[in-house]
Amino acid sequence: MANDIKSKVKSLYEIMKDEKIQELEVDSKEYSICIKRKNNNEVFLKKQILAQSLVVSEEEKVGTSSLGETIKSPITGVFYKSPSPSSPVFANEGDIVEVGKTICVIEAMKVMNEIKATFKTKIVKILAESGKTVTSGQDLFEVEKV
């Protein structure tokens, strides 16, 4: 099913690119897909496979801003630094984070989406406030590659 969805997403993206469409939403009995093109080089994708009650999101986008290198939110939702209010945070400022380690979660549509480090990094600054809404593309962390 995942490969079927992946090929459908690729096909939809090619149509969007050819027709210069910036945003596309598709709802079916099996899945719901929302694709938004921010610019020609950057795509944020959120897809929900309803039949399996599974939400799959792109991992964090990495970009460069006036802050230096940042990790951006792939989706809109509520940002959390820890899995629960009484649990320790996933990452603190100054921490060195290994590839694949969860650095935060974003709750969207009652689903907790883990955002994981895609490269070994040092967390320079946490830019989002726990419990507050973040938007797709918003800077979450200022980081340095290690």
Image (cartoon, rainbow, N blue to C red):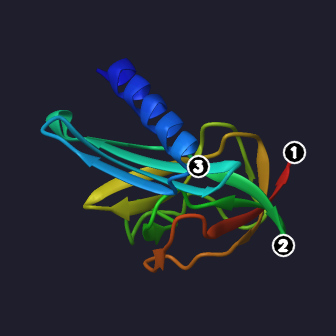
| First-in-chain label (2 vs 3) | 3
State the residue lying farthest toward the front: 19
Residue at 69%, 65% (x, y): give it: 141
Residue at 36%, 62% (x, y): give it: 107
Q: Which residue is mark 3?
A: 43
Where residue 22 sits in the image (x, y, percent)?
52, 57
Residue type at tag 2: Leu
Foreground: disc 2 or disc 3:
3
Q: Element at badge 1?
A: loop
Q: CA distance from mark 2 to mark 1?
A: 17 Å
- In the rendered structure, the answer to whether residue 23 lies left or right of residue 52 reads right
- In the rendered structure, the answer to whether residue 67 lies left or right of residue 79 reads right
131 w.r.t. 60: above or below = below
Q: Which residue is mark 2?
A: 67
Q: Are marks 3 and 1 in contact (CB under 8 Å)?
A: no
User: Quick one: label 2, few (<14), some, or many (20+) residues within 10 Å?
Assistant: few
Residue type at tag 1: Val
Q: CA distance from mark 2 to mark 3?
A: 21 Å
User: Residue 9 sits in which quadrant?
Assistant: top left
Foreground: disc 3 or disc 1:
3
Question: Could you say which is closer to the camera, residue 94 or residue 80?
Answer: 80
Q: Which residue is mark 1?
A: 146
| First-in-chain label (2 vs 1) | 2
